[in-house]
Image (tube, grey):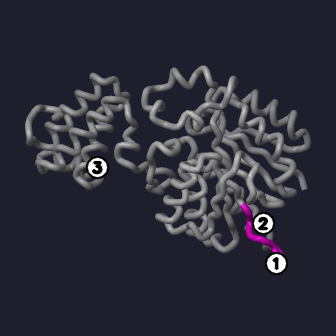
Amino acid sequence: MSVDGAESGTVGSLLRRGSGALVDAGSESPRLDAELLMAAALGVDRTTVMAHPEARPGTAQLAAYDAAIVRRAAGEPVAYIRGIKEFHGVALSVDRRALIPRPETELLVDLAETEVRAALSASPRPAGTPPFLIWDVGTGSGAIAIALALDLRRRGYGAAISLLATDVSPDALALAVENAVGHGVADVIRFAPGDLLETAERPAAVDLIVANLPYIPSAVVPTLPVAASFEPTMALDGGADGLDLVRRLLSDLDGVVAPNGGALLEIGADQSDAVLAAAAAALPDWRSSVHLDLADRPRVLQLQRAA
């Protein structure tokens, strides 16, 4: 199916017709979607597409673009069509095996980096002390662990850290491994199957746990935009109030987090009071707080264990 019924046309005209088709299909960002899909079809970046509206795609490129527009009009996320998603400056491979990384999760990465750098800069780790251990629980595509590994290595902390990444989904874990290998950080991230903190690779003491667990209430999942229906339901559904997995994780933190260690958990924008209450009940001796995202909405629960 061709957007305009022709075999050729300029990039500008194809973008107009493609975005028009996406408007009719109910896309929330039709022009941006069309530009990204055109860039993917041409093998260039979006800036190049925007700078050369007079260019004429070849027959194969036009066919690829048309097919992508049809898939997007059917609701499939742009990230799955392109096979790539940018996250915290990292281009990750994505497909239906795992949730597409969201921009709001970048706050969790920023907070984790701050915690690691503060801990390692405060005082040198004694000789023979294991590296600072970060555990990414429910790693999905590996986005959080890989972004942390790359950024901390770039800042000179590579030899002082190690990461463990686990997921209950073998398919998601395989995708995470592929991404880690592609970005050259498979040597500092150990991947293992695991249901939250239940894993054969469970360490004795973890310095920092990071997790973006499913937190959408079950009744809300069917009402999400159609694009979400292409993602794994188990990566979205958090139970009746969205906090089933979060509560399970909280109940087990005492047995795995080292003294002075902590945890960072992504939450829904309306879950601040509920997660703080759950944290107080499960971990009465821990300090807890909630960080706001760029839109001033609650986004990350931070927990700190006393020495």
Q: Is residue 284 magenta?
A: no
| Region in magenta | 126-133
Name above or below for residue 188 compared with residue 109.
Answer: below
Dot placed on the residue nearer the N-terminal end, 1 or 2: 2
Q: Does residue 296 appear in the picture of this structure?
A: yes
Q: CA distance from mark 3 to mark 1?
A: 48 Å
Name above or below for residue 161 compared with residue 237.
Answer: below
91 displayed left or right of 192: left
Disc 1 and disc 2 in contact, CB within 8 angstroms: no
Tell me which residue sits at (83%, 75%) in the image: 126
Badge 2 amino acid: Ala
144 displayed left or right of 78: right
Tell me which residue sits at (38%, 49%) in the image: 83
Seen from the viewer's position, the closer of residues 240 and 302 is 240
Residue that carries the numbered disc 2 in the rendered image: 122
Q: Position of residue 44 (x, y in %)?
A: 26, 55
Seen from the viewer's position, the closer of residues 118 and 62 is 62
**Secondary structure category for the residue under label 2:** helix
11 displayed left or right of 196: left
Q: Which mark is residue 128?
A: 1
Q: Position of residue 132 (x, y in %)?
A: 74, 65
Q: Position of residue 164 (x, y in %)?
A: 68, 59
Q: Main secondary structure of the magenta part?
A: loop
Q: Position of residue 78 (x, y in %)?
A: 37, 40
Residue that carries the numbered disc 3 in the rendered image: 40
